[in-house]
Amino acid sequence: MNTIVRLGEDLSYNPAMKILVIEDDREAADYLRKALDESGHNAHIASDGEAGLHMAETGDYDVVIVDRMLPRRDGLSVISELRARGNRTSVLILSALGEVDDRVTGLRAGGDDYLTKPYAMSELLARIEVLNRRGGARDAETLYRCGDLELDRLSHTVKRAGKEIVLQPREFRLLEYLMRHAGQVVTRTMLLENVWDYHFDPQTNVIDVHVSRLRGKIEKGFDGPVLHTVRGAGYMLKAA
């Protein structure tokens, strides 16, 4: 494998990011995940384009790293589909194809940056840092509203009908995720991966308990329900 060089580089890097790596070369993917994890990030791996597209759509990642040559769906197709669906997650393309035309094609497909293999890990880390800063524009929205329910990420406060609601940290994170996806069905798997950071079902009622507590806090004494159970699918936050 001739993918990553300069293994002795300093990999210290902040702030922590949630990163999806779509790479079918198992050795390259494992190395990259290890390097990212050691740098304080939370790296997830998809080994083909279809799986990567699904994870990118449901995973709330800060940055997606995509190899161009992938089975089932090529990397540029993944990026184009994400953009077509309105997903603005920052994307770094990795490829052994390094000609100017190759880079232009990748960027025009919707990639935010293009890095040619082999690459230095320090450069990759620097590039995702820049992409994350740029991506702040997509997360610049700090105030979410759903009807008369309001969540402020900066002040870490929640109000409904102007009345402040006190939430525990996990409840706040759960509500924030639901509000970011207001009007959409949020599945149990999406909540496990993005609120609890589980990549398996622990077979407990942890989600049910937290949803029930959150529902009680944001609905009791207020005008109408906002957190709805979608039978057999998951939950949906929808204005009363």
Image (cartoon, rainbow, N blue to C red):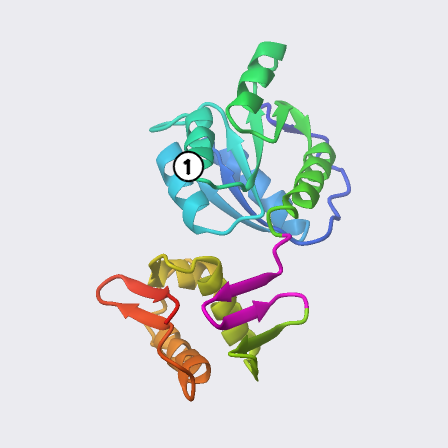
Foreground residue, 67 or 159?
Answer: 159
Using the rendered view, name the quadrant where residue 147 is placed: bottom left
Q: Quadrant of the N terminus?
A: top right
Q: Residue at x 46, y 84 (%)?
A: 217
- Asked whether, in this view, residue 212 is left or right of residue 40, the answer is left
Nearer to us in this view, 12 or 53: 53
Image-quadrant location for residue 200? bottom left
SS of the residue at dot 1?
loop
Q: Which residue corresponds to the image point at 37% horizontal and 27% vertical from the top-left? A: 71
Residue 11 found in image quarter:
top right
> Looking at the rendering, in which quadrant would you find the C terminus?
bottom left
Query: Residue 8 location in percent, x, y?
Result: 75, 37
Q: Which residues are magenta?
A: 140-154
Q: Which residue is mark 1?
A: 47
Residue 197 appears anywhere in the view = no
Sort mark 1 into few (<14), some (14-19) or many (20+) by Cα contacts within 10 Å: some
Q: Is residue 101 left or right of residue 205?
A: right
Could you tell whether 94 is left or right of 123 in the image?
Answer: left
Q: Is residue 152 magenta?
A: yes
Residue 189 pos. (x, y %): 36, 59
- Regarding residue 157, the answer to whether it shows in the image is yes
**Spot occupied by residue 204 in the image (x, y as percentages of width and height):** 34, 75
Q: Is 162 placed above or below 82 here?
A: below
